Image (tube, helix red, strand yellow):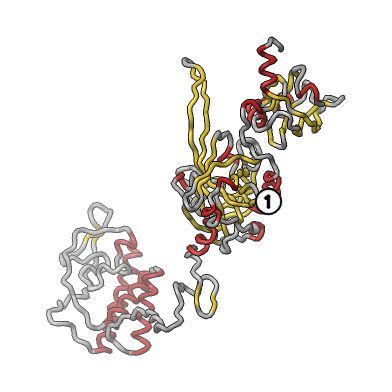
Amino acid sequence: MTDQRDEFEKDRDEYETDMDNLENMENTEHDAGAPDNAVSGGTAPEKSAGGGSWNSSEQGTQFGGFANSRYIGHPINDFESQTGWQDGPVPQPPVVQQTNTGKKVLGILVSGILFGVVAGGTMFGVNQAAKRVFSSGDTRETSAPLILEEAAPETEEKADSTVGGAIGSVESGTVTDLYDVSEIVENAIPSVVAINTQTTITQNDWFFGPQTYRASGSGSGIIAAENDSELLLISNNHVVADSQKLTVTFHDGTSVEAAVKGTDPNTDLAVIAVAMEDIPEETKGKIKVAVMGDSDSLKLGERVIAIGNALGQGQSVTSGVVSVLNKKIPMQNGTTRTLIQVDAAINPGNSGGALLNRKGELIGINSAKYSRTDVEGVGFAIPISQAKTIIDDLMTKKTKVPVPEDQRAYIGIQMSNIDAVTARNYNLPEGVYVYRIIPGFAAEQSDLKERDVIVKFGGETVRTGEDLQKLVSYYHGGETVKVTIMREDENRVYQEKEVEITLSYRKNAENAKKNGQP
């Protein structure tokens, strides 16, 4: 510490010599009332009894003699902050007003050099001040003005919202504001509908047995096509699955009943149909078929607009950008979906709604969002280019309108379910297992056999007996339907096969049961 103090005393003497030379060179007087000891060298300190710090002189001089200096408190001259050493209480020095900036700047600069301090922001300011003093010879204190670019004078052609250059496409000096999507929405919103569903749910209660109650849900749909008899809409499978009643509300507020035409649980796609005769003529003039786009041409950061029945409160609009393309999302059933990730809000009720590009073209079907509380701005949509083939196939399915009881079809089998766990454990296909064919009805008169596993009925996926019964309820007795099965070959390996069944009438089966037939 003694060597450090001696070196510091030497630097202090050099500093005082520089200050004297500066005073003689500029010949500038102090302000009235400035004390003679404003820049006092002080006396050499003595080590304190405690050994942890250095005591000051009676005049309050700190280690280095700068306690009463007009530079006290400056970060460069604050030896306490630079070394961690402290001294006893020091009287507050009188305020000294200095008109000569050159002296102040030089003092700060020299003391900074003595201490060997390098502080980016501080030294940059000191260097810039020193340049002004020593390059021009002007000793007056000045401050650099804040330069603001003046706004261009208003003309007939003025640019809107330009920050660091125009955002968007520029034509004839006019900037297209990408944040204003009102025109796109106005053109596209007649193609989007709100969907409300009613479902009957049965739960088993330990004390009271099966309990049945009604549940309602909401989602969205997109008008995709029309023919002479039906208006066809795209939605999500999870929106319409298991629903007993579907209601579609168009943009003008008109509500009509709809029916499921086809679903694909693996891709979460569905097509529903509205009978053209149920739509008022006035509403027909206000709705339109969506314009299909190309999701394969999307780019990261491209602006997108989401329209849907958010929270079941009617159509709403959100916008954002494409965050990730071809995002692989693992599903609970073990499959993986390839989706578009966007930061536009996809809220409950938006499922099945439209994701549009800047041209107003349909490039995705809103499907899901991350629902964790610590995640925001992560929504997903099914790419339309990927979904188109499946949608076209679903549009060819039979519209699932419930058939009157006296006309309903009947297969004539006893069955059990092979769920995913059983299928995995016993190397079986998932579906409906036929363990008995009832004599005298449709199954017996077809190529269907016991031990077959039904996986599709009329082109629709079948996983449980409930799925099969629901699908059969949409057919009349006497209709012929294609059934996809899995059948064991001679090596006990299951192979896919398709059979045709001409359905019996359910009422005949009920009459046979009343007469005591099995």
The location of residue 241, given as percent across then percent down, is 58, 36
Seen in the picture, residue 225 relative to 36 is either above or below; the reply is: above
Q: Residue furthest right?
A: 490
The location of residue 40, given as percent across then percent down, is 21, 74
At 60% from the left edge and 53% from the top edge, which residue is drawn?
364
Q: Nearer the viewer, residue 372 or 468?
A: 468
Q: Is residue 124 left or right of residue 97?
A: right
Seen in the picture, residue 358 relative to 273 is either above or below; the reply is: below
Q: Nearer the viewer, residue 330 or 503?
A: 503
User: Which quadrant of the structure image shows residue 459?
Assistant: top right
Q: Is residue 457 left or right of residue 215?
A: right
Asked if residue 495 shows in the view, the reply is yes
How would you rate the neighbour count of disc 1 (Cα within 10 Å): few for under 14, some for 14-19, many for 20 or more?
few
The quarter of the image holding the N terminus is bottom left
Q: Residue furthest top?
A: 516
What residue did someone put label 1 on?
388
At 48% from the left edge and 30% from the top edge, which residue is drawn?
214
